[in-house]
Image (cartoon, rainbow, N blue to C red):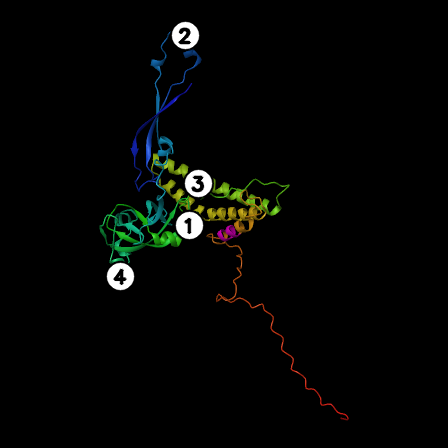
Amino acid sequence: MQTQARTTVGLTQLADHTQAPKLADTFKVVTKIQPKYTWLDHLAGVFCINIHKHKKMEEKEEYVQPDIVLGSSGDDLPNPFIRPVYVQSTRKNTSRSHALSMPAKCTIDSGNMQGNIVSRHFVLDILEFSEANFCELTEEEKQGGRTVTGELFVPEGAIYLDWYHENSTRVFRSMRFLVSPHAHCDLIIGARSIIKDKLLGVPNFNVGGVTVYTPPAADRKKHTEERMTLLATWRKLNNDVKNDISRIRKLKEALKVEDDEVKKEEIETLEKRLIEPKKELLITTKTIEVYDAKHLIHPNVTAANKDKIVDELETELEGMDGYKGTKRVKQVPNGTGSSSVDTKKPEAKKAMPTRQKPRTGAL
């Protein structure tokens, strides 16, 4: 019987910007594989012949995430506020048809009111921009600010960058960053951008752990043709996205073994191709969720809470990036300054009293 024994050798930081990122800390694990024994070996053992000394144990090295080695106790999990992202650089691919995106560690800092920050080292050495790309600072930015340790932070300039998270459907274009002289981090997203762009929820960083709705299976006896069509579209999109993500993961694993420009270009092409299908998948999922809520197919919807949940889901659907469907027209009551139509009937004109003719006749 083949047995395996795992030994943790050490902790390795994958912070190299030249390789496709798995930027979280990983453990190097050596797996010792016991040799296989045939029935002839067992027969030799019956006659006290030592076969074991002629067989050698195999060793297999691999890099795994900390929660696989230590177990997900909570403290061992990756920090949800330090995430891997990609930033567009000035570098071109071999065919020079498009710019390459470079991996970076992005810190989400809700206590940072100074603005978004990028290190000078990352801008000049990794992205290969020049100081000529720096923009003028505003009067407020020139004053700088204090860090939590009391140190004065004065940016050297500002620059506009395009970046995206690998699990997101959005690409943030021309986001303003202050250039820091310190190389303590690659990117820091400040409180203003967190609120403005709603970065902590789906479909961006998903820090809150919001789960995406999984539609119940189709039932031809109970469900309409409309839902069957929606579910078929959802399944196709879901499979296509899963296949591309799986392909990207395999290519990144291969890059750990050997650096290959062709694989890097294929990864970038697949990641760009995934942007629109991910949007469509999320919109289709939310559309099915709205339908299921309206028809009480949704497992969390009852007749009592149906109206409230449907309204919330439709609001979420209409606010999704890439949604092109018709939006509801909300009725606004009068007296709020809106151009609502007055539905009151005009008052009828009062009839003028008729003059009475003087009586004629004998007194």
Q: Quadrant of residue 218?
A: top right
Going by the picture, which residue comes out furthest to the top? 47
Of the two numbered discs 3 and 4 in the rendering, the one whose residue sits closer to the viewer: 4
Q: Main secondary structure of the magenta part?
A: helix
Q: Which residue is mark 2?
A: 46
Hey, what amino acid is under mark 2? Val
Q: Is disc 4 placed on a helix, strand or loop?
A: helix
Q: Residue at x 41, y 7 (%)?
A: 46
Hey, what amino acid is under mark 3? Ile
How far across and down, in percent of the image, does residue 261 sit?
35, 41
Q: Which residue is mark 3?
A: 245
- Horizontally, residue 298 falls left or right of residue 79, namely right
How far across and down, in percent of the image, does residue 233 sit?
54, 45
Q: Which residue is mark 4?
A: 139
Q: Which residue is mark 1?
A: 170
**Foreground residue among 343 and 208:** 343
Q: Label 3, label 1: how many angstroms apart (C-alpha)? A: 16 Å
- Crowding at mark 1 (Cα within 10 Å: few <14, some 14-19, many 20+): some
Earlier in the chain: of badge 4 and badge 1, it is 4
Say if the magenta span includes residue 48: no
Q: Label 4, label 1: how many angstroms apart (C-alpha)? A: 31 Å
Q: Label 3, label 4: how many angstroms apart (C-alpha)? A: 44 Å
Hey, what amino acid is under mark 1? Arg
